[in-house]
Amino acid sequence: MRLKYLTLCLLGLSLSACSQHVIKTNSSSVNLEQKAINSINAMYEYPSYDYRGKFNIHVNLDQNNTNSKDGKAQLDAALKQKVDQYLRDQKVNLNAKQKQALYVALAQQPKTYSTKAEKFTSAMTNILNDMQFEYDGSVHYRQKMGSFNLTARYEKPTLLVQAKVPMVLDLKDYKFYINYFALMPYLVNKENQNNLAYLDFSKYQGLFNQVDFKKFAEYVKASSAVYYRLADQNNIQALSVSSADKAAGVVEKIRLKTSIEELVLQANLYSKVNEKYLMQSVLNFNEKSLEKLVTDEVKASEQSKSNHKLEHKDAADDASVVSQQLYHLVNKHFGVDDEEDYAAESDEDIADATQEATDADEYATEDEAVVASAADDAEQEGLSAAQCRELYNATQMTYGDVQYCESIYGIDVFNSADKTPSFITTISKLQSVEKIFAVYDQNQFIDDHAFKALWIKHQAEIQKALPPIDKRNPFVMDVGLDAQGRAVKLDYDLNYALPELKSSFNIKADMYVSNYGKATPIDQAQLKRAKTWAETSKGSMLEKAVNSFSEKLGQTGIQEHSVEPYTLSLDDQLETIAAQKYDATHSYEQTYKAVFIAKLTESTPQIVERYSSKELQEIASVYAYWYSDEDVYNPEGKALKAIEALQSKHHLQNEDQFDDRLGRAVDRIVSDAMRGDKDRQEWKKLKAQYKQPQQLFAQQYQIQFERENGISNDEKVLLAQTSNVLGQVYVDARKNQLSEKSIKSLKIEHNEFIDYEIFKDVYMKLVNAK
């Protein structure tokens, strides 16, 4: 938290008040709270100082899943047994390999983020846990300058990587200097690898010139004081001074014990009540200047968007990887530069991702609106919220009641009221308090003392928004004071748990402050030698090939992909199961029930554990009836009466008692399986006729291309030739030998018969073929 305000102070280096006042020695009558506040504010009251420190981040990804020796998650034994029993009852025949793949996919569920994001998070976790970060620098208020040098060290028994990145911020000449070459020296020309590069932001100097730095100083110092001012006096303690502390000049040590939730709320509310004051009286922003700033930035963003290129994406599966590699090989074979096509493709990906995110937000908003309106009159139609909470301790409960409580009130009856609130829930509650404090935002400065009065006044609302004390995430800050009462050593320790992601992280950091008023000078000669980013990169890889460099990095994964069949996603596996079941039974209901168990395990495994296999099959039967179209599945007579009896038994008689997303997801998979029945029969015949993979691929590609695009008799020869080449591409890719040699017989007239989506689809068919 202190780093936030250190940054603010760096941005306000022309702060005149910071250079004129020196803290006096605190008298013995000053309490710990005021001593800590004064010591930290010393960093804003001396003309300069040096600082150094280190920090590390440790992330625990505790999935509560057991792991096999190869590190893959394994499904809970009891849950695995229940799923296995259900599949046997449904006569879903999977071989050992298919079962294991299904169990692994289920063990990784539920997921609230994409597979790519999950892989990236896991990779970054492994790196962060082994990284050590150190930093040092100096602040010079009178010169309006500050330096920050970051060193990162990654060490393993057989690997050592270390890089130092020096940075300087100059608010007098409005330049930001950096030597990023330490990370990648080959991105700049040789003669500039030891020099700084600078970014000129003088076009924004008007924004800095209009800042009232005296008021800014008051604002920052009061914000520093808030956390101590609002703390319970029992949570501000004097600590003993160790020999190591004494060596650093510490004569007194003060500890603040609080929680991350309280710090976040305090910072946000303090910002909220001073929002207009900060914007209008300190930064001197008015509506016109803000509107102009936003308009200019939007224009600049739109202008650069056309030049933006995404890095080569990691493939989700082998078919996508090979298709992408094929695309580049074909372009290379014909001497075509594919960068423009790739940029267009990237823009389409961005648009698609944006649309998906928008749709998801709209869907979530609709869900919230439905839940809110439904809860108002829910008690007239079904269980009340109180009755739902009573189910926490119930030994028996119907499925419909469980789902009703979740749909209407958001109550998970399998998790008692003492469960840890999610991060999103916590933030949402904290934001509700901001609305209460917004009325105090009147363009008048509310300092730490005045803010404390507001904090006390609204304690009821604040405590309601905060999690229970025993569920808050701890934050500890130790401040070491020197003989003049100045902060010379700061230690931070925070832990934060994310139960919804089954993970937690810990950050430990320290900072030493020294040479108050006598900071180490910044090397002016080095700044004079600095050149613009464009100049330092001239003639280097960065100038001509930064985009292709990223692409080459992405292709490393292409060349190293495994020749083993890739791991199917859960939905891919369920589509296979649905197809097999429908081919064997030609029954919507039986196919629905076969898929239902896996999707239910994905979303709510506690329900699968709670009910017997027979009960789960009965629930699946009702879901199949509820979500099917009448022309697909419409039971009559005894079959209908049996369904109605099950509806009554499991309380599945109105829409609020169903998990709509679950029901629709299963219906989609089953419906797709039914629609693909004819294609699968043709595919079986083709597999029986053609035993060689190259021939099978070529024939299937030709069939699908003709069906989707249409073709004249004169073009059939060219299509057949193209299909044969692509068949060879498949064979070489499976052997991990795909190269330009694979498409050497490809001619320019064949190019129009290459459909990469069809290629991927056929590729997947062959990979999944038994």
Image (tube, grey):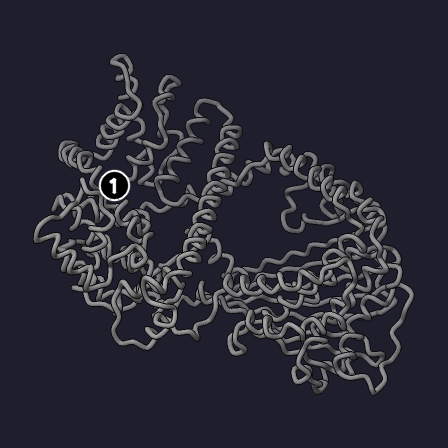
Please identify the residue farthest to the top as the structure is shown.
714
Tell me the residue that label 1 is attached to: 672
- State the image quarter where residue 153 is shown: bottom right
Q: Amino acid at mark 1?
A: Asp
> Residue at (77%, 68%) from the top-left corner?
447
> Residue at (29%, 65%) from the top-left corner?
401
Q: Is residue 151 left or right of residue 571?
A: right
Q: Is residue 348 left or right of residue 639?
A: right
Residue 640: image x %, image y %? Answer: 13, 52
Please identify the residue farthest to the left as the structure is shown.
638
Q: Quadrant of the C terminus?
A: top left
Near mark 1 (Cα within 10 A), the count class, few <14, some 14-19 or many ≥20, is: few
Residue 17 or residue 55, whichever sits in front: 17
Q: Is residue 398 left or right of residue 461?
A: left
> Residue at (46%, 71%) from the top-left corner?
420
Whether 763 is drawn above or below 53: the answer is above
The answer to whether any part of residue 385 appears in the image is: yes
The answer to whether any part of residue 105 appears in the image is: no
- State the image quarter where residue 721 is shown: top left
SS label for mark 1: helix
